[in-house]
Amino acid sequence: MDAAEERHSMAQRARLTDEEAALLRQREGLELSKVRVLRELEESVHERHRVQLKAALAYLDQQLAALG
């Protein structure tokens, strides 16, 4: 993200209500967690760990879908 995009993003966030900002933070947190889980899933070799990661991924997808 370049500086102009970052300023635009910050300006947009400044216009959000507290509730909208909280939802945005929640979505960003879920998306970051999903990236981490996907990365771990790619690297995992143990089947039990892969099962846990797939369950975590399904949960994160469910939570993201609930946010809309």
Image: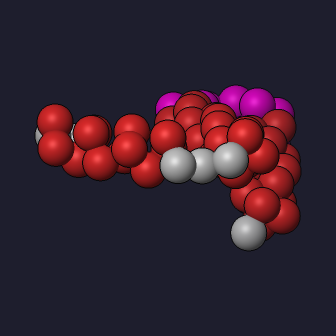
Q: Is residue 47 visible?
A: no
Magenta span contains residue 61: no
Which residue is more in the foreground, 48 or 20? 20
Which residue is more in the foreground, 61 or 68? 68
Across and down, in percent, residue 12 comes to 44, 50
Which residue is more in the foreground, 45 or 64? 64
**Magenta segment:** 42-51
Across and down, in percent, residue 20 comes to 70, 50
Q: In this view, does 50 lie to the left or right of 13?
A: right
The image quadrant of residue 34 is: top right
Across and down, in percent, residue 63 comes to 82, 54
Number of disc labels = 0
Look at the image and tell me in which quarter the C terminus lies: bottom right
Colour scheme of this structure image? secondary structure
Which residue is more in the foreground, 11 or 34? 11
Q: Is residue 4 left or right of residue 55?
A: left
Task: Determine the residue positioned at 23% across, 47% down.
Answer: 5
Q: Can residue 6 be seen in this view?
A: yes
Task: Determine the residue positioned at 68% across, 47% down.
Answer: 17
Task: Determine the residue positioned at 60% across, 49% down.
Answer: 16
Q: In this view, does 41 lie to the left or right of 65?
A: left
Across and down, in percent, residue 53 comes to 74, 39
Q: In this view, does 39 lie to the left or right of 10?
A: right
Task: Determine the residue positioned at 52% across, 49% down.
Answer: 15
Task: Give the prevailing secondary structure in the magenta stretch.
Answer: helix
Look at the image and tell me in which quarter the N terminus lies: top left
